[in-house]
Amino acid sequence: MRDATRVIRAGLPKGSQGDPFLPGPTFAATYHAAGDPASVPHTYGRFHNPTWTHFEQALSELEGGPTIVFASGMAAVSAIFGAVLRQGDVVVMPSDSYYTGRVLANGYFAQMGVQVRAALTAGNAQLAQLNGAKLLWLESPSNPGLEVCDIAALAEAAHNVGALVAVDNTTPTVLGQRPLALGADFSVASDTKALTGHSDLLMGHVAVHDPAWADRIRLWRTQIGAIPGPMEVWLAHRSLATLELRLTRQCHNALAIAQFLARRSEVTSLRYPGLPDDPAYFVAAQQMQRYGPVLSFVLKDRTAAENFLSACQLVHEATSFGSIHTTAERRARWGGDAIPEGFIRLSAGCEDVDDLIADLAQALDAAH
């Protein structure tokens, strides 16, 4: 089946006369559970929920491996760190990956005795840091700089030295890139972003190649309590059905916007992996099916960037990305990333692309 069919059918139970296609959310903290707990499919709301089961089955079908859902993307990231890393272990991370993930590794886990090594995403620079590593963490394209690494090559090198490999796949989603098929042991994503795409819930997931790791990740979720609410999971499953439609429009819009910005003299350091002249294009084209909704560029300085964002009428100034709404922000306002003050991260939504380009043009003119 093709993607548009797969996302609509994924995780749906076999049809039963008079039942809905997707059962409604199950709101339960406790269930009828007499006798031996092993014989009861659901016993307690922190352990399992049938609404989770349907959505996890859907993601498992798309990811190509068992999947566990979490209350947020960072809860999913934390689960991999917590299940894999122990005192004395080494984790190799991109120095330009998602900031909060780096803060977690360099803070809590470093304090617990985990050694963190960092190298840039571009040029597969993490290869030089792999000896003795327990976990290689990748993010491709990186957030916010949109650098790309060769996931298959890095995964092979990591496995050769006995390291596990996790890929943060938030930006492209599973329809844009399939880390498990490229050799990763873990595929992790913040489903708050493009996977659910409506800016109305927090969610994350971990998909694994080896089912034994699914048991360990699930145990972490149970013991830490990083569980999603059934209503949020049901909304996420409902939203998943339109992922292919949304992502197709978003990627089309992102490429058109990038091509427009490339013609503007005030725009520098434009990055979008789907542009043939982007430094990441060759590698991205080998491992990505879609290039994602996110692009970045730099304006002259902080003032120019802030004036541009203020002048936009169809672009919401907001953090996060992947929504049906086009959003942008001056990313340096948060700190933590080695980027210029005029750096803009823009996430293309599903609006008419001609309207978006017209709005961006007038905003760039007004920012002078």
Image (cartoon, rainbow, N blue to C red):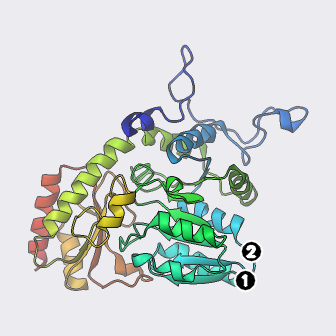
Q: Where in the figure is residue 210, as x and y percent of width and height?
A: 66, 52
Which residue appears at 49% of the width and 57% of the height?
A: 182
Residue extending furthest toward the right: 35
Type of amino acid at the residue the image marks with label 1: Gly
Callout 2 crowding tier (Cα within 10 Å): few <14, some 14–19, many ≥20: some
Query: In the image shown, does 31 or 83 lie closer to the viewer?
Result: 83
Asked if residue 66 lies left or right of residue 298, the reply is right
Badge 1 element = loop
**Quarter that holds the C terminus:** bottom left
Q: Is residue 25 visible?
A: yes
User: Number of numbered discs present?
Assistant: 2
Circle 2: residue type: Arg
Q: In this view, does 192 lie to the left or right of 296?
A: right
Badges 2 and 1: C-beta atoms under 8 Å apart?
yes
Residue at the disc numbered 1 = 113
Q: In which quarter of the image is the N terminus?
A: top left
View extreme (top): residue: 17
The image quarter containing residue 334 is: bottom left
- Dot 1, how many residues are within 10 Å of its Cα: few (below 14), some (14-19), or many (20+)? some
Residue positioned 20% across, 80% down in the render:
299
Q: Which of 168 and 226 is in front in this view?
A: 168
Residue 312: horizontal and vertical position, in percent? 19, 66
Name the side, left or right, on which 158 lies relative to 47. Answer: left
Sequence-first tag of 2 and 1: 2
Give x and y (percent) for residue 125. 46, 80
Write down the quadrant of residue 42 in the picture.
top right
The answer for how far apart the CA atoms under marks 2 and 1 are is 7 Å
325 or 288: nearer the viewer: 288
Query: Which element is circle 2 on?
Result: loop
Question: Which residue is denoted by mark 2 in the rendering?
Answer: 86
